């Protein structure tokens, strides 16, 4: 994806799709980082609030400080070793298609 994440990066999933391990594995592979979910149900609203807190942290807090409490996270999966070989060419192709569509003003 050409998204470079730090060594300790993780994806935290919330909401209905967070119960589907197959979807979570794909997310892990696409972002090439481990996936965690919250330890309690009905987490979609919490996920939205969590994201809002990260986006609006105007006190100089780093994202890492806002999301530092990992006590309610459950490890779900890690990316497969060959995930970049699979997904990076797909992303390149996707970007080409989007660029072509944008140039045609669709």
Image (spheres, rainbow, N blue to C red):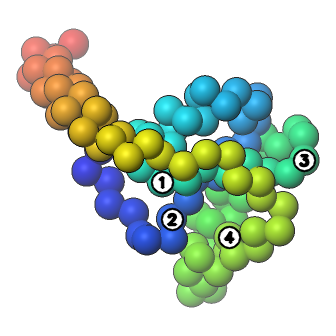
Residue at the extreme bottom of the image, as rendered: 60
Instruction: Locate residue 22 relative to residue 68 in the image: left or right.
Output: left
Check contact, mark 4 vs mark 1: CB within 8 A: no
Residue at screen point 88% across, 38% down: 42
Instruction: Give the mark toward the camera: 3 or 4.
Output: 3
Of marks 2 and 3, which one's residue comes earlier in the chain? 2
Q: Which mark is residue 67?
A: 4
Q: Which mark is residue 9?
A: 2
Please rate how many residues cluster around mark 2, counting C-alpha atoms within 10 Å: few if below 14, some from 14 to 19, many from 20. Answer: some
Check contact, mark 2 vs mark 3: CB within 8 A: no
Residue at screen point 10% across, 15% down: 104
**Picture quadrant where residue 29 is located:** top left
Instruction: Locate residue 60 relative to residue 52 in the image: left or right.
Output: left
What's the CA distance linking mark 2 and mark 3?
A: 21 Å
Of marks 1 and 2, which one's residue comes earlier in the chain? 2
Of marks 3 and 4, which one's residue comes earlier in the chain? 3
Of marks 1 and 3, which one's residue comes earlier in the chain? 1
Give the labeled residue for mark 1.
33
What's the CA distance linking mark 4 and mark 1?
A: 16 Å
Identify whether 51 is placed above or below 23. Answer: below
Q: Is residue 31 visible?
A: no
Residue at screen point 76% across, 73% down: 69
Instruction: List x then y, in percent, for residue 95.
Output: 20, 31
Give the labeled residue for mark 3.
40
Instruction: List x then y, in percent, for residue 86.
Output: 28, 33
Instruction: List x then y, in percent, for residue 74.
Output: 77, 54
Of marks 2 and 4, which one's residue comes earlier in the chain? 2
């Amino acid at each position: 994806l050409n998204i470079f994440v730090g060594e300790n990066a993780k994806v935290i999933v919330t909401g209905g799709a967070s119960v589907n391990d197959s979807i979570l594995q794909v997310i892990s592979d696409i972002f090439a980082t481990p996936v965690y979910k919250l330890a309690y149900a009905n987490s979609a609203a919490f996920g939205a609030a969590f994201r809002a807190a990260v986006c609006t942290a105007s006190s100089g807090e780093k994202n890492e400080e806002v999301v530092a409490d990992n006590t309610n996270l459950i490890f779900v999966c890690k990316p497969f070793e060959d995930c970049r070989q699979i997904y990076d060419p797909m992303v390149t192709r996707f970007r080409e298609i989007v660029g072509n569509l944008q140039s045609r003003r669709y």
